[in-house]
Amino acid sequence: MNTADTDTALADRLTEALTLMDAPDLVLGVTRHGRRTVVTGGSALAPPMPRDALRYELGSLSKTFTVLLLADLAVSGVLALDDPLTGHLPDLPLRYARSRQITLRHLATHTAGLPRIPTDLVAGALLHPYANGYARYDTARLLDTFARTRPRHPPGAHWHYSNFGLALLGPAMAQAAGADYATLLAERVLEPLGLTGVTLGPGTTGTDAVGHRTNGSTPVAGADMGGFLSAGAVRATPGDLLSYLEAHLFPDRTPLDRALREVQVPLLRRGWRHRNTHTLTWYQHPAPGGPLLFHVGATFGQQAFLGYHPASGTGIVAVATRRGRTCHMIGTAYDLLYTLAGEAADRAAYDAGPRPAESG
């Protein structure tokens, strides 16, 4: 099969995958050794701007950008991953000794012992799931809450997912590097990787995708993350997300080679029989030919998936303007990546195998 036929066949598979998802707007893209295939769809009328040109809210996928920035600062000697958080935020009146043991690595890997969100946000999140409590939670309040929060366990002892912990990386890196988080991210990650469509807030009118509630019809206001910028504020176009994946697949082609490799090193295991592996920022699962790495994210009305398989040079981007399991986007995108990885491994095994002798 020639390249054109291969591209057409992949586009057909992606279009079929879209039929398994349910959201007003959907974009599904694949990169294989830098060659891209992107399809769009959704239950709503197409917006004035093409769906694959809009910026989508990444939610927790933003954490991969933050931790890549952290790795780059460590590679550059601005800080060290095992620096105590208090070394970069020295004036906090901490109440608990465990808080002084938390390192930047603990925050990045969700092993600091901090809750998922500050306790004073929990009641509002339960009673009003679409009300954005983050918007009124500035950095000063974030740091004050941390100073009064007792870590649930000794840092490094257990994995517990924490937006709270990742949010603290923003002000810590800013203090260490002498510039705010947004400036650091732009100068040290976005610009070197050529990610021109990535922002930390809304763009001009019509350039941002509009999220929806679980019902798929009620619009949701854009997410203002307040002091949680480093935990969930990134917005990006599908094209920039494909470029981001390609940087991880081929680090030596970028200015961030060492940092991109650092964030892919397996660091810890968790879950039943310790089957789940984590790097500094990515989830890692076994797959044919080698592991695949992925992360997901969601805001109040959008969700996103990024995954890549270094052994086959394959990456997948999926974004949707609806949040919830009934969208079926995450599972569909993950299964597709795993299948493509398996097909690539089968081809590699076939190519490396013995060939029948020619008849003479």
Image (spheres, rainbow, N blue to C red):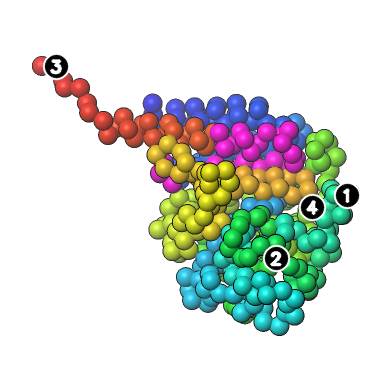
- Image vertical order of residue 307 relative to residue 164, above or below: above
Q: Is residue 83 visible?
A: yes
Residue bounds of the magenta highlight = 310-335
Residue 103 drawn at (x, y percent): 59, 70
Q: Are marks 2 and 3 in contact (CB under 8 Å)?
A: no
Q: Is residue 266 above or below residue 46?
A: below
Residue holding disc 4: 222
- At 51% from the left and 55% from the top, the residue drawn is 268
Query: Dots 2 and 4: beta carbons under 8 Å?
Result: no
**Secondary element at tag 2:** loop
The quarter of the displayed image where residue 156 is located: bottom right
Q: CA distance from mark 2 to mark 3?
A: 72 Å
Q: Residue at x 65, y 55 (%)?
A: 160
Marks 3/1: CA–CA distance: 74 Å
Q: Which residue is mark 3?
A: 359
The residue to which callout 1 is attached is 128
Q: Which is nearer the N-term, disc 4 or disc 1?
A: 1
Q: Amino acid at mark 1?
A: His
- Indicate which label's residue lies in the foreground, 2 or 3: 2
Residue 151 is marked as 2
Q: Nearer the viewer, mark 4 or mark 1?
A: 1
Frontmost of labels 2 and 1 is: 2
Measure the C-alpha gap from mark 2 to mark 1.
26 Å
Could you say where residue 327 lies in the image, as x and y percent from the top left? 71, 34
Label located before the other in sequence (2 or 4): 2
Q: Residues within 10 Å of mark 2 (few under 14, many from 20)?
A: some
Q: Mark 3 falls on what kind of element?
A: loop
Q: Nearer the viewer, mark 3 or mark 1?
A: 1
Secondary-structure class at tag 1? loop
- Marks 2 and 4 sit apart, C-alpha to C-alpha, by 31 Å
Is 39 contained in the magenta span?
A: no
